[in-house]
Image (tube, rainbow, N blue to C red):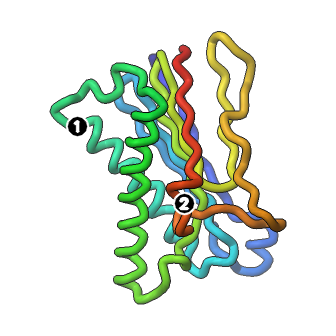
Amino acid sequence: MNWKAVARFAIGTSHLNQGILCQDYGNYLIFDDVIVGAVADGAGSAKHSDVGSKLAVETVLKCFSDINESPQKEAFSQPLSKEEAEEVFGKIMNQVITELQKQADEENYSVNDLACTLLVFVATPDWVAAMQIGDGFIVMRSQESEYQLLFQPDKGEFANETTFITSKNAINEMQVEVIPEK
């Protein structure tokens, strides 16, 4: 399969008017017939969410690159069960949290200054696994179905409230789906 992908993010007009940096980041990697992508939306209330969103995405992609290069290179050859996907994504999210904490310690600020939401997917010709922390959207269409929203966005109790990767309950709030379809 030949994947075609685009990752784009831009500063919104209100951020431009206020002189705020772009707080969003997205990127992807392609390994033969597998594509991995991640998107992070920095929290507007976090001082360094631009740094946090980029670090979160790059850490995710590094983890998947490491999985792809492992001796058991068949990591993407069989569909993951939901439990296996939860385990893989959980380990990767713990690594993201570790890297964010390291960054905060090195720069002498709170890890919450790096707050962002995070969406990740792994797609092969035969299956897709995805996870979400926060209020984003992942939409997919398999050969057998119409477009479908994989997760309901995580909306908190109040307006403009969501779970961030730096939230204490982030791993517990992580949503995971596996779609075993082409």
Classify 10 Å Cα crowding around label 2: few (below 14), some (14-19), many (20 and above): many
Q: Amino acid at mark 1?
A: Glu
The answer to whether residue 51 is left or right of residue 11 is left
Disc 1 is placed on an element classified as loop
**Residue beneath disc 1:** 69
Residue 26 image position (x, y, % from top left)? 55, 51
**Residue beneath disc 2:** 170
Residue 74: image quadrant is top left
Classify 10 Å Cα crowding around label 1: few (below 14), some (14-19), many (20 and above): few
- Of 7 and 135, nearer the camera is 135
Mark 2 near mark 1, Cβ–Cβ under 8 Å? no
Residue 19 image position (x, y, % from top left)? 71, 80
- Of 106 and 93, nearer the camera is 93
Q: Residue at x 75, y 62 (%)?
A: 156
**Above or below for 171 versus 180:** below
**Above or below for 46 versus 119:** below
The answer to whether residue 90 is left or right of residue 169 is left
Name the image quarter holding the N terminus: top left
**Above or below for 16 versus 5:** below
